[in-house]
Amino acid sequence: MLFALKKVLSALLLPPVSSILLALLGLWLARYHRRTGLTVVVLSLLSVLALSWPPVSGALVRSLERHPAVTPRQLAQAQVQAIVVLGGGPDTVAPEYGVEMLSRGSRERVRYAVHLQQQTGLPMLATGGSSGGTRAEALVMKEVVEREFRGRVRWTEVESLDTRGNAEKSARLLQAAGVQRVAVVTHGWHMVRAVRAFERAGLQVLPAPMGFKSGQGRRLYRVLPRASALADSSLALHEWLGILAQRWSLNA
């Protein structure tokens, strides 16, 4: 119930829904205060345009991508004992296959985790539960790792629904196995919150980010407003909301 409430609130607070709601508010205000209402409508439309502009979305994403890519040498120097790969969102049912499939984000994370495992030989933990009637995401990740990428998953954490749960429940499994130092694999824009959650759970963390969105070429189509840039902006703002909520919970 709490998980669903968090999803609903974040949807209402983030673009484009928040901008639409703001525009509707402006239209209502215009019935009583025309200038004020129209100003609110214009601002809501401009916010969508600004967030759809790649330089703006790129700046928002770069504000989160603080950890650089990791090397096998750094993994060895940090004496990492295991690789933890976080689920990238709910798994989806593919009717053409008749089975659950990983979301694009999860698949990208899994591929990179296997890449690190092939370089280091470290054991892997996959973490991610299920918010619906499908299999836990960690189980689907394990299947993909072993069937498609020829990797190995030693532990699966199948109960968590968010980053905090990923960290707390994974830490219990790992600490029971004597593991204290881990490399956490997730997207660069998600790493700030993930590192804090796993450190708070009692683990020593080496960030192993992937899927960097910043630093892309400055071609014309990357400068013109587009829907994918709006999606990136919404993603970055969602992550900042999560970071603020995490800081509030730490100080509460």
Image (spheres, grey):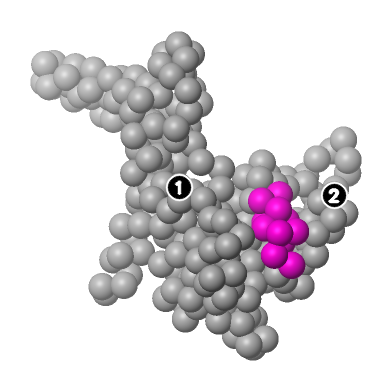
The amino acid type of the residue labelled 2 equals Glu
Disc 1 secondary structure class: helix
The answer, for residue 118, to whether it is visible in the render is yes
Q: Main secondary structure of the magenta part?
A: helix
Q: Label 1: which residue? A: 189
Q: Which mark is residue 163?
A: none
Q: Front-most of 83 and 118? A: 118
Q: Is residue 207 left or right of residue 123?
A: left
Identify the magenta region: 111-121
227 drawn magenta: no
Q: Quadrant of the C terminus?
A: bottom left
Residue 29, relative to residue 68: is it above or below? above
Which residue corresponds to mark 2? 148
SS state under label 2? loop
> Which one is nearer the viewer's eye here, 48 or 37?
48
Q: Are marks 2 and 1 in contact (CB under 8 Å)?
A: no
One can see residue 234 in this view: no
Location of residue 161 in the rendering, given as x and y in whole percent from the top left corner: 57, 63
